[in-house]
Image: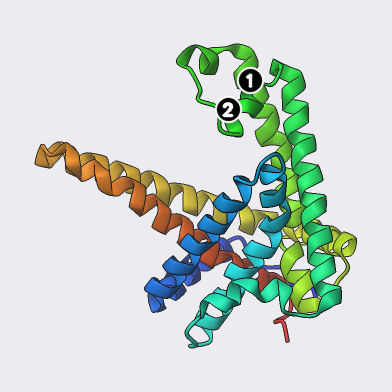
Amino acid sequence: MKLNLVPARAGTTWVKLGMRTFFKQPLALAGLFFMFMAVMTIASLVPYLGPLLSMVLLPAATLGLMAATREAADGRFPLPIVLLAAFRAGRQQTRAMLVLGGLYALGFLGVLGLSWLVDGGGFARVYLGAAPTRELMQEPDFQAAMWVFIGLHLPLSLLFWHAPALVHWHGLPPLKSLFFSLVACLRNFRAFVVFGLTWLALLILAVASVTLAGALLGNPLVSNILFPLLLLMTAMFFTSLYFTFRATFEPPP
């Protein structure tokens, strides 16, 4: 397994490839993304253990979307069964993926727990689904807890960015996959910054365009397309994840 160093401009290339591949199979990839969302939502509704279960399944579910992108990029139609790719590669890799999911759940709970210490759990409860109030969101402790969560979640995301793909396609054990994922993200940090900023710019452009169109047409119903548009952009974002992995490491077998 070879780690590739890429220029900063690769970040925009990943975004372009993700969008181009999405539009090759828009119905299939959008449908698989909504299935991914549905599975995560249903898992989170399991009494008591729901949020923990959804976090354990997240690396495997993300790998399923990456596998679907690989199918589409190679000119094949991704079938729904591809979402289970993480669990169809043998018992050893299935166990490794579940261990990876368990590690992510522990890390996420640790980050959320640290934010709890800042404001007594206000931000954590809102993140887990409690209805926020305007007064709560304006409290300094709530905002401080939010920034603590964001700041600590970034390194957690870098640890797990490539890890599911490394476990699945390169057969690395969970801890080793976390190490190489973090190293790869840090060595190509400029490209990932450009990648993130490009998606942020596209998000701002989409929101501004829909808002402006609604104002010019004098029709507030135009804003109703904003939520579906943001969902489609999120699907394209997940599609682009495969290309960050493909460019950073040697092509998977």
The correct choice, above or below, for 68 with respect to 60 in the image is below
Could you tell me how many numbered marks the image carries?
2
Mark 1 Cα-neighbour bin, 10 Å: few <14, some 14–19, many ≥20: many
The image position of residue 252, as x and y in percent, is 72, 82
- The picture quadrant where one finds residue 253 is bottom right
Element on which disc 1 rests: helix
Q: Is residue 2 left or right of residue 66?
A: right
Residue at the image position 67 percent from the left and 75 percent from the top: 85
Q: Nearer the viewer, residue 135 or 247?
A: 135
Q: How is the image coloured?
A: rainbow
Question: In the rendered image, which residue does mark 2 sit on?
Answer: 126
Mark 2 Cα-neighbour bin, 10 Å: few <14, some 14–19, many ≥20: some
Question: In the rendered image, which residue does mark 1 sit on?
Answer: 122
Residue at the image position 72 percent from the left and 33 percent from the top: 112
Residue at the image position 80 percent from the left and 59 percent from the top: 100
Q: Nearer the viewer, residue 166 or 57?
A: 57
- The picture quadrant where one finds residue 82 is bottom right
- The answer to whether mark 1 and mark 2 are in CB contact below 8 A is yes
Q: Is residue 54 left or right of residue 218?
A: right
The image position of residue 203, as x and y in percent, is 41, 48
Query: Can residue 183 be spotted in the picture?
Result: no
The image position of residue 239, as x and y in percent, is 52, 67
* Disc 1 to disc 2, C-alpha distance: 6 Å
Quadrant into which the N terminus falls = bottom right
Residue 37 badge: none
Amino acid at dot 2: Val
Amino acid at dot 1: Gly
Residue at the image position 75 percent from the left and 78 percent from the top: 169
Q: Nearer the viewer, residue 7 or 233?
A: 233
